[in-house]
Amino acid sequence: MMETELTLALLFERVERYFAKTEIVSRNPDKSISRTTYGEVLRRSRKLANALVKLGVKPGDRVATLAWNHSRHLEAYYAIPMTGAVLHTMNPRLSAVDLAYIMNHAEDKVVLVDEVLLPVWEKFKGQVKPAHMVVLGKESDALLDRESDNFKMPALNEKQAAGLCYTSGTTGRPKGVLYSHRSTMLHVLATALPDALSLGQRDVVLPVVPMFHVNAWGLPYTCSMVGAKLVLPGPNLDPHSLLQLMHDEKVTCAGGVPTVWLAILDALDKEPKRYDVSSVKQMVIGGSAAPQAMIEGFDKRHGLQVLHAWGMTEMSPIGSTTRLRPEHDALTLAEQFRIRALQGMPPPLVEVRAISEDGKEAAWDGQSMGELQVRGPWVARSYYKNEEEDDKFVPDGWFRTGDVVTIDRAGYIRITDRSKDLIKSGGEWISSVDLENALMGHPAVKEAAVVAVAHQKWTERPVACVVLREGASATDDELRTFLSSKFATWQLPDAFVRIEQIPRTAAGKFLKSALREQLKDFRLPE
């Protein structure tokens, strides 16, 4: 058989040959709309590649981006690996300390910064030393105007690095994950499959997930490969701005974290006829577990289908998706909703197993719990420039995710909790995720997060932090009664704390470490 290097060069050639006229839409910070095409983005990418080479960028160098979702950022997605350099997307929601650490650790040669993110850059620029900083906007356009749109790519090797992302660092310093051309291309091919994200050239895709967050789950490259129209939302991610884009551009697929979709569901519930979102075939929800009540709410009240996905930075990031199998068609609607709230099956080439506390592989029976471990061609084998051994990478070649799961006989994964978030009460485990998802099914509850609080007798007990919907009310007894049909009495929260907002990580997930800190002196009822 022919030996073909699996590099992004194949993707660029395919885009130019088949999808040059396909539209790319960007919404600017002032909410105006800019329109271009894949062909024009690729032409400008070659100009940017020439400019980067003149700035001294060589194969293997890291080039950072500090930018929102728009066509100029997509140009960098193409241009940087085109030169043989490494695309390093940086999350502007991180602290200045973390951003400085990440840039210094990556040793970025050049950084491309959005005009609207210059205030973020100003906070840490004195702590870093890239050779060049280029502002994406008028400055970068002027730079490109001076360059030729002909660029001779160096010979790319599939094993060389194409991208670099860092974890959010909620439990320590952020850690870098280096993606190769080969891993990126295999991830693109697998995620486009029908039982994964099921994307094609008839789709109109809205990546709500930022391009600085695990490369927007790979969507910019996947959409390029299949020729899907891209709708890039910029920095305005409020529910009405997103719903307007879905309405105007006839979006068929959108992807984002649960907190985004909870706000969108709330907006649709309040004004169900304001937007026509009938074109939307699927809303991909990942980043953390999607409450079953939210999945049902979109489906029953608005006819919108949620595709539940799971992944990690260390997995490029897609690790599983939840689609019903043919044998599920005969199940009741309630049972189908239960299955759709699981994390689902891994795509081809990704293997999974659950390792119990005794070190043995847990049975695939839907009951036996263990820590999820994964391996595959787009799963990291180590962290970037990690000088110390890391117990997340086990000797037989698997990666420890830190998620505690069950796996059923059909191979569907159910995450019961993060290992650090499980609550051990009187020697028995309580899933904070199960309690949260059930609480968010109560009509008065907008958001809920459950954490462990120290208890003299039981070691730990669950406390629920609850954000109520505007104008709604619910007593502790009402919430406890609502949960009592699904949980044993000893599993129910000992207290319910009303808060205005649940703290979030830079990726939009609930930040439970902050809640635990807030509740460290909380006194439980006797």
Image (tube, rainbow, N blue to C red):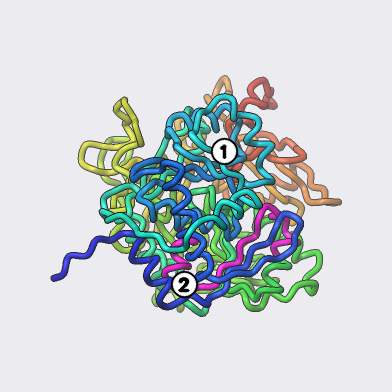
Q: Which of marks 1 and 2 is nearer the N terminus?
A: 2
The residue most toward the front is 146
Q: Quadrant of the N terminus?
A: bottom left
Q: Can residue 404 be seen in this view?
A: no
Residue at coordinates 70% horizontally, 27% vertically from top-left?
Answer: 525
The residue most toward the left is 1
> Which element carries disc 2, helix, strand or loop?
loop
Residue 376: horizontal and vertical position, in percent? Answer: 28, 53
**What's the residue type where badge 2 is placed?**
Leu
* Residue 526, quarter of picture: top right
Q: How crowded is mark 2: few (under 14 residues within 10 Å), some or many (20 or more)?
A: many
- Residue 240 counted in the magenta span: yes
Q: Residues within 10 Å of mark 1 (few under 14, many from 20)?
A: some
> Over which residues does the magenta segment extend?
218-242
- Side of 200 relative to 347 (left or right): right
Residue 96: horizontal and vertical position, in percent? Answer: 60, 30
Which of 480 and 108 lies nearest the eye of the viewer? Answer: 108
Residue 490 - label = 1
Q: Which residue is identified by label 2?
A: 199
Residue at coordinates 57% horizontally, 66% vertically from top-left?
Answer: 306
Say if 446 sits above or below 129 in the image.
below
Which of 514 and 274 lies nearest the eye of the viewer? Answer: 274
